[in-house]
Image: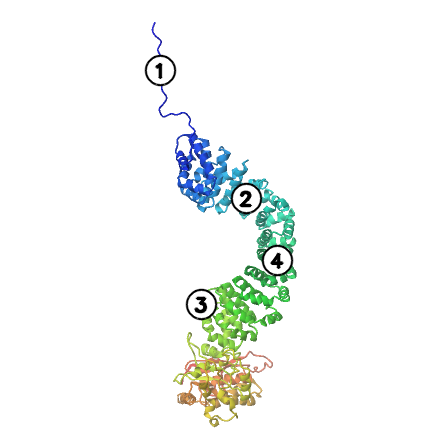
Amino acid sequence: MGKKEKKEVEPPPKDVFDPLLIESKTVATVVLMLGSPEEEILAQACEALYKFASKGDENKVTLLGLGAVEHLYKLLSHEDPIVRRNAIMVLGIMSSHHDVKKFLKELDVIDSLISQLAPEEDVVIHEFATLCLAHMAVYYTTKEQIFKHGGLEPLIKLLDSPDPDVQKNSVECIYLLVQDFQSRAAVRALNVIPPLLQLLESEYPIIQLLALKTLEVISKDREIRAILGENEGLDCLLKILENNEFSDLHVEALAVLGNCLEDVHTLQMIQQIGGLKKLLSFVGVSAVPDIQKNAAKAIAKAAYDSESRKILHEEEAEECLIKLLETASDGVKVAACQAISAMCENMASKRAFGLQGIPQLVQLVSSDNEEVKEAAVTALANLTAASPSNACAVAEAEGIRPLVNALNAQRDGAVANAASVLTNLAMQEPLRVSIQGQAIMSALVEPLCSTNSQVQSKAAWAVAAFACDADARAELRAAGGLRPLVELLRSKSKEVRRNASWAVMVCASDEPTAVELCRLGALDVLEEISLSKGRKNNFSDAALEKLLDNNLPQKYSQLGYLSSRDIIADGFYDCGKIRLGVKFFSLKELSMQELSDRRATIFINAKAQDDLAAGEKTQDSSSEQTISSPTSRKSSKEKGRKGKGKKEEEKPKEVIQITPKVQEETDPETSCWLPPPDFILLDYIKDASKTILPLPTTREQVVALAQLVADKMGGPIERDRLDDFSWEIHISELESELKCNVVPIGRIQKGTFCHRALLFKVLADRIGIGCTLVRGEYNRAWNEVKLVEDSPQGAAGLLLPPREYIVDLMFEPGSLIKEGSAEADLYKYISY
């Protein structure tokens, strides 16, 4: 029998060892172990690194420098769940460090992290994956990546996790994500409200807080607010407010409710369950500034809707806001003022605030806090708009002085609204007078110079409100306020231009101010505006007209026309027609120019000597209004002159010298220049008053006056001898004699159309005959009068409309030529 074969045993592989317990005290060695193919070694290495990273930020940076993050990232896709779990734990704890977060973002780990949120994964993986996402969601680009990779849905599902850490990390990440509008829109479809409301019942305050913060952000969406109401979220929020144990959550709960108050429907729901009354009561007794501030902000948001304002008024929200004005917190005061501003759009609320809140608001106008001051002034501006009773309440609360002071506030909103309040008060004359006593025009100069268009607009409107008073206009001139007002006419803002035009129109109500405005270029700017379709407005047209109406020399020079309402007073002068863009010189400037061959300037000044002395004493030395003002009557040299009514040739020539010697001894920039009186013209006026005024009919007066004018200026001229009437030589002789191009009209003994028409208008205005003065071409000018025709035969008592006539002052003095006739055209335009 054969032997039994012996079976050989195979030796073990050379590279296989029995299990070994590897220990290392060097972190670099542990990091190297992350490259091992052994699951157990990987798991142990990750566990060791987790403990190491948990000890502080310095260790996290060390691991980052050793390249641990790259290895850990690769392990997120490892087949072994323990390895994945331990790797995500290390990344989760390390991701709190800024540098690690940046590196993870560069590695593009978002997709891998989101994959760890699958329902079948271990709860620990959920915890640290959500932790890592929450840390990284602070970056906008990371938020966008999480959204694009569908991270919102698994995060929302994890809000129902039994693990509080997972809940906390998930809701925190969602809170960061919904800061972006895309995520806010997406969570609505993912039904985020029920799980968030469930988190409000958590035993962990941090989870409750994060849930409320998330609700506060997403409840800015109208549809979310509706869903919140459908899920009894309003009740839940009110219960938090009623529970003192949740005092640390009251601010956030109130913020969510504040968003809910923006919808009328939601507000009605809150009112129906008694929540609005509870809310206002809660705010009234609270001493927490943030709660009070958020409540006021919530009321302000709601008050932008008219129906919501009615509901708030029904619940007496005004009383709550007035109480908030008395708190110590400036932030609360600001929020309360803003809510009052919104609420007073409701007239009933406006009356309620007027009865109780105005004194407190007036006190806040003097606050050292500029934001409080601005908010208080804004509230007063809204309260006094179209409310005379509230305007009176502001004055009774001694608010005028603080409001005038607020025109120099640091914040533009405070300045603009202070001007608005003062304008509202100025609608009542007694209050306007009181405000004018506080130097309001001087205080408005700085706002007029502002670079803020709202301030400019409100300041200009305030000027218009107060400039209806002559003293106020004088104050504005003296304070230098006219120059910035004129500059506002050039503004690119339509509202600023309109209000500035209105202010210029009101300021131009007297001649001194109108003259100064023209000197500063207002007329030129308004003319430019009138030619522009885009910049023109009704106020600019009215301002242009008013400016010229009170500056007749420039009106006649520029338009060539004075109506019967334009009364020529002393100080008027005719320097001929000027083109647009050419400077219009004052009478003082013209008189100071050297004698030249240009057209003579004819001036009017028939003030008696006694009146001149009185006029000089009352002269306004604060401006240059004396240049063409009726009060500008007397030169220094005429002070001692006696006698009047003499014929021209009997009067000493030096008496009417236009540039008196005394001016050579004074500084022309500081001396008050006055044109000399024209005593010959004064005699003409006396003669007209004595002989023409008593005539029974206007027609007879017109005829007699025409004959008087013609007699004083060379008599009638034959039509075919007009060229022989050497009036030019006569005027030149007068200019040479006076050593000036400015000639008083009384000295002209040979006058042509333009001189006679001017004299006729001057005399007619003095004795009450209505007539126009029209400039034509080639020294032509004429007067038009309106006369009533006699009733035709058989129609006794029939009143006919007046007809216009041109008064012949040259050929047949006193002849009346029907306007529109061929004879009228010959008189106006045809040269003989």
Between 369 and 638, the one lying in front of the other is 369
Mark 4 or mark 3, which has the lower sequence index? 4
* Mark carried by residue 325: 4
Question: In the rendered view, does 4 fall on the left or right side of 300?
Answer: left
Between 800 and 642, the one lying in front of the other is 642
Cα–Cα gap, marks 4 and 3: 49 Å
Residue 670 shows up from this direction? yes
Image position of 709 with respect to 293: above or below = below
Mark 4 or mark 2, which has the lower sequence index? 2
Mark 2 or mark 1, which has the lower sequence index? 1
Tell me the quarter of the picture where residue 7 sits: top left
Q: Secondary structure at mark 2?
A: helix
Mark 1 or mark 4, which has the lower sequence index? 1
* Mark carried by residue 8: 1
Cα–Cα gap, marks 1 and 3: 115 Å
Badge nearest the viewer, 2 or 1:
1
Mark 1 or mark 3, which has the lower sequence index? 1
Between 437 and 251, the one lying in front of the other is 251
Residue 101 x %, y %: 44, 43
Q: Which residue is mark 3?
A: 532
Q: Which quarter shows the C terminus?
A: bottom left
Q: Residues within 10 Å of mark 1 (few under 14, many from 20)?
A: few
Cα–Cα gap, marks 3 and 2: 59 Å
Q: As drawn, which residue projects farthest toward the front?
A: 25
- Do the numbered discs 3 and 2 sit on residues whose CB atoms are within 8 Å? no
Tell me the quarter of the picture where residue 527 sits: bottom left
Q: Secondary structure at mark 3?
A: loop
Badge nearest the viewer, 4 or 3:
4
Q: Which residue is mark 2?
A: 210
| Residue type of the residue flagged with mark 2 | Leu
